Image: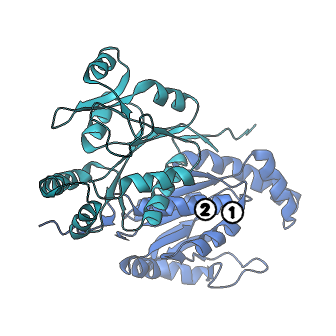
Chain colours: A cyan, B blue
Amino acid sequence: MNHKPFIIVVSAPSGAGKTTILKEVRRLVSGVFYSVSATTRPPRPGEVDGVDYIFVTKKEFERMIESGDLLEWAKVFGGEYYGTPKSPVIKALEAGMDVLMDLDIQGKESLEAMYDGSIISIFLLPPSFEELRRRLNGRKTENESELQERLSRAKVELKWAENYQYWVISSLIDEAAKGIVSIINAERMRRERVIFNLDID
Amino acid sequence: MNHKPFIIVVSAPSGAGKTTILKEVRRLVSGVFYSVSATTRPPRPGEVDGVDYIFVTKKEFERMIESGDLLEWAKVFGGEYYGTPKSPVIKALEAGMDVLMDLDIQGKESLEAMYDGSIISIFLLPPSFEELRRRLNGRKTENESELQERLSRAKVELKWAENYQYWVISSLIDEAAKGIVSIINAERMRRERVIFNLDID
């Protein structure tokens, strides 16, 4: 069944397991293009340029803004830029693919402000705040002050969950991934998106 | 994940395979109560009272209307009554179950007019009008004039598909059933339905 393609934005407080869940979603669903964000922040250990992010300099990022190469962009607290390269997304949509975006709350807000096409927004909720704290502790990539900062940022982010269309609880990776896949499948069957010609007469 | 329960209405032109598809949906999904309609029309061969329909006399049906025992009802072309007994549906919703209803277009319209709770509407589309004709022919339960009547009714019904929120194509029973299950799962994750308390602070 053909449908008019759309953008799916997934956001989560850090520690909700978003990266793992989205990898599983991409494995389970076809016809979805995964948009890789551009950023000026330095790569973290293990991050691959072009896969996790497109890592660029501030100068390059500002040139992309000026040339209109970004679908949305934002300068986050701390001064780093994050943005979505426009051309891969537009090409995928034109080819009839839906586009999956892993954006933070600010990115989702700027997308909604700058893009007037169809956007489905999903917020991944941690099962509880205690569980979120436990997960962030288990990560061991941050020192105590960074952990505290992440926790208080998570609290602020959770208040933004109200602005998302769907809530998926990330207690189990598999369940959460299947939940997102169900949402994508259901949105493809919305009457206004279905492309269907029932040769009557 | 808990959610505020809702009613799912599925309609289809006859010959779209609705009965078989809904049986498969009920097998695949949990937490769904299947609503059995009441009718005054006589049972067809193989139909079981209380399973396919609750078969009642006109007098009994009219008493149910007067007593307010029906969530919705309609008198169809031909003079027979169809309606949805109210109490099983309300009890299921109060128990946190979603309610699946197999209604014709008139039933769905009267439900929307008489019930002000949350309703999800799904229309099952035959893959093509030719396929619909082929399926109705294959049924062999009708004579030629009945077949012609069903076909022209199907044409009228298809024009009503615009008033449904979702379109599911019934080319393959399994695919169509999985599609409906995805819709139910996705609707359970809509922000306004999710019951969630994230013990922050």
Q: Is residue B191 above or below residue B53?
A: above
Res. B107 in view: no
Percent x, y for residue A143? 17, 55
Image coordinates for residue A79, horizontal then vertical, percent: 17, 32
Quadrant placement of the N terminus of chain A: top right
Would you identify the image quadrant in which residue A17 lies? bottom left
Q: Label 1 lies in what chain? A: B
**Can residue A66 be seen in this snapshot?**
yes
- Residue denoted by label 1: B174
Instruction: Confirm or deny contact between disc 2 and disc 1 (CB under 8 A).
Output: yes
The chain containing the residue under callout 2 comes to B
Q: Report x, y in % for residue B124.
A: 63, 55
Of residues B113 and B30, the one nearer the viewer is: B30
Quadrant of res B11: bottom right
Q: Nearer the viewer, residue B62 or B165?
A: B165
Residue nearer the viewer, B38 or A8: A8
